Image (tube, rainbow, N blue to C red):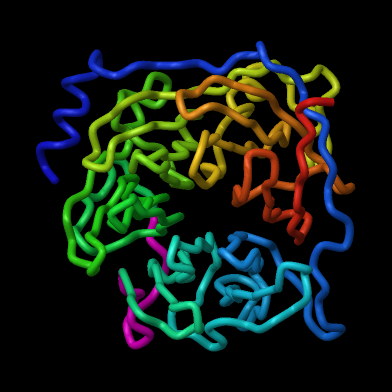
Amino acid sequence: MKLLPILLLACAGAYAADTATAGASEIPFDSVPNLLKLPPDLHLGEAAGVAINSKKHIFVFSRGNTTGPAYGATASQILEFDQNGKYVREIGHNLYAWSFAHTVRVDRHDNIWAVDKGSDMIVKFNPEGRVEMVFGRKKEASDEGGPWTRVNPPRPAVDGQFRQPTDVTWDNEDNIFISDGYINSRVAKYDKNGDWVKSWGVPVPMEDRANPKPGQFNTPHGITSDAQGNIYVADRGNRRIQKFDHDGNLIKIITIDVPVPPNAMPWYGNPITGPAATAQSGAPWSVCVTPGPGTQYLYSVDAFPGRVYKLTLDGQLLGYLGRAGRQMKQFGWTHEIACTGENEVYTAEILNWRVQKLILHPGK
């Protein structure tokens, strides 16, 4: 754990950097209408996460079922829908880990994984919806509580402990990789049995924010993997995707640089212009890789100007779509994206309280 970040920084010249530019064009697409059929007495809150299993069932991690005060309320609920969008069940009702939903993932064995930022916990459910494995531990209710705060210099990470984790993925050997996220700013690796292996990455110091080094993270907000076991980290605060092998060796840094339209509007209202717009455009909130066999593709999303980006695994931009807004085919802070095929993706939106299923038509 101690040596790897140093090695990453010392070997800054050993990786390849790639910038996805505006060489690709906008991709036509459709959004499936009336995707989710909710019972009359059930509503989504902020849709923090979405995942799809082998049966095409849709899992939504919603900041619904909210209890408690306006500030510090518990807001986590996993809802399952079938392949036609019909409501099936709630998973983990009244679970001890529920605090503030962040992402949900489904592994290749159809196990369901929930990452809760508020409780600092990652929970593995089997396909039947029973808890099989737990990572991290929330602060005890009997203690004087409060969220982790961000300080400079950052607190040192502790093996096995999480501070506002964000996402989870696996390699082809079922090793587990957790992006640990807002405070620790690292990747934690466990083996398939849940035994600690290592971690890599360090928070980027304030003095390096303008020019972060390889292996430094500023809010690793999402994580995914490809069929070769390579790990892709959505390094949101540094506005880049870092690609590693499954041992934490840096392969490539990918940045997405597509010009922001002059009339682009953020979801909140007033146009963002100048350096602020450039800083946010392309900053990855979530990443996913399409399943194999065959050619795999990398998808990324940003909050402003609110686009979905399709790339090769080497970081070549193939196209982009969408913009911020409240209508269908527009996005309000896409917090997680799930890839089910080369041209089929799902988006979970924080601000619009919904999930969209997108069908891309790159040949049109």
- 300, above or below 345, in the image: above
Q: Quadrant of residue 119?
A: bottom left
Q: Position of residue 319 (x, y in %)?
A: 68, 24
Q: Is residue 316 left or right of residue 119?
A: right
Q: Is residue 51 left or right of residue 190?
A: right
Q: Position of residue 98 (x, y in %)?
A: 50, 77
Is 242 covered by the magenta stretch? no
* Span shown in magenta: 136-149
Residue positioned 70% across, 28% down in the render = 320
Q: Quadrant of residue 208?
A: top left
Residue positioned 60% across, 61% down in the render = 52
- In the rendered image, the quadrant that contains the C terminus is top right
Q: Is residue 104 visible?
A: yes
Q: Who is closer to the viewer here, 357 or 241?
A: 357
Secondary structure predominantly adopted by residues drawn in magenta: loop
Residue positioned 71% across, 34% down in the render = 307
Q: Position of residue 238 (x, y in %)?
A: 45, 30
Q: Position of residue 286 (x, y in %)?
A: 55, 44
Q: Is residue 124 left or right of residue 50?
A: left
- 31, above or below 249, in the image: below
- 311, above or below 23, in the image: below
- 310, above or below 82, in the image: above
